[in-house]
Amino acid sequence: MVTSAPKRHRWAPTSGEDVATNAQECVLAEESRGGAAAGDTAASADDTLPPPPPKVPIRGLYALTPDTDDDEWLAAAVAAAIAGGASAVQYRNKTADAETRLRQARMLVRVCHSRGVPLIVNDSVDMAIASGAAGVHLGRDDDNPFEARRRLGPDAIIGVSCYDEFERAERYAAVADNLAFGSLFGSSTKPGAVRAPLELLTRAKARGWNVVGIGGVDASNARRAVEAGADAVAVITGVFGGIDRLPNAVEKSSVQLRGIAFRP
Ligand SMILES: Cc1ncc(COP(=O)(O)OP(=O)(O)O)c(N)n1
Ligand SMILES: Cc1ncsc1CCOP(=O)(O)O
Ligand SMILES: [Mg+2]
């Protein structure tokens, strides 16, 4: 019987640096079997998507994806972030076309929900519904949060960006599951983003809201966000780095950030 060699990715470790994580090995192994489970990166014959886990407040590390058209890397990197302790994942891709975004969102629903972690879709309620996501994150240029709640129902996770505006949080607190403030620090992903003082996190926490801090968060400053009141830190670069960061490095940065950000 002829068997084909396992597929290697350009970012996969070569001999001598064979330090693959469980997550990476899992995705590669699934692909080499032609499987369509957690690491599915291709259109699947079985269109059933795993349902979201039961809704709980987001705490600790909330990993947001960087823009990439490399599905295989994305699936492995997100699996690694979860292996490292990310408690929620947001699919955010500001440059891909709609077809790519739907394909990647559905792929990440499989990766995340099969691991008991909710996949939140950025910007679009339509995309959240079409992909079977656990919820949506909405900013000032996106769908209205009240309309989103009406369409998605009580079980969906709805996050709302509040930037540096406490009044915006007050407006949406009743309909949102979490309220995000930022940019807390300088962000290479969004260098022009308005800066939000850490004190806003303290005021929001005092109101009993589920509070997320975003923007330039990494292992050097995450503690400041958490001590100010953040229940979770939302992180792109601090987790995924450049999009060629190996999954085992993604897992390590997640372990570190989760250790700082998660308060039992
Ligand atoms: C958790 C979280 N917080 C804030 C944002 C930013 O949302 P928005 O202002 O709509 O900007 P874009 O991400 O769409 O560029 C977020 N996505 N997630
Ligand atoms: C989406 C967003 N909103 C404010 S800053 C930011 C980018 C966060 O990315 P990073 O963690 O790389 O600074
Ligand atoms: Mg948005």
Image (cartoon, grey):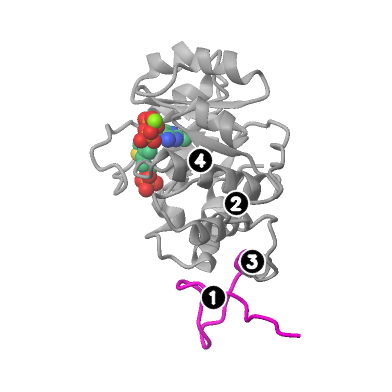
Residue extending furthest toward the front: 1
Q: Earlier in the sequence, mark 4 or mark 3?
A: 3
Q: Amino acid at mark 3?
A: Glu
- Graded by Cα atoms within 10 Å as few (under 14), some (14 to 19) or many (20 or more), the crowding at tag 4 reads some
Image location of residue 177, percent across then percent down:
57, 24
Left or right of 39 in this view: 216 = left
Q: Calculate the distance from the C-alpha at mark 2 to the C-alpha at mark 4.
A: 11 Å
Q: Quadrant of residue 149?
A: top right
Q: Nearer the viewer, residue 165 or 152?
A: 152
Q: Ligand 3 is found in which quarter of the picture? A: top left
Who's the residue at 45% across and 22% down the image? 203
Q: Amino acid at mark 2?
A: Ala
Determine which residue is flagged by label 2: 43
Q: Earlier in the sequence, mark 2 or mark 1?
A: 1
Relative to 118, say whether 8 is above or below.
below
Q: Earlier in the sequence, mark 1 or mark 3?
A: 1
Residue extending furthest toward the bottom: 16
- Graded by Cα atoms within 10 Å as few (under 14), some (14 to 19) or many (20 or more), the crowding at tag 2 reads few
Instruction: Report the disc number at residue 31.
Output: 3
**Where are the magenta residues, as a range?**
1-24
Relative to 168, say whether 33 is above or below.
below
Q: Calculate the distance from the C-alpha at mark 1 to the C-alpha at mark 4.
A: 25 Å
4 and 3 marks in contact (CB < 8 Å):
no
Determine which residue is flagged by label 1: 8
Q: Quadrant of residue 161?
A: top left
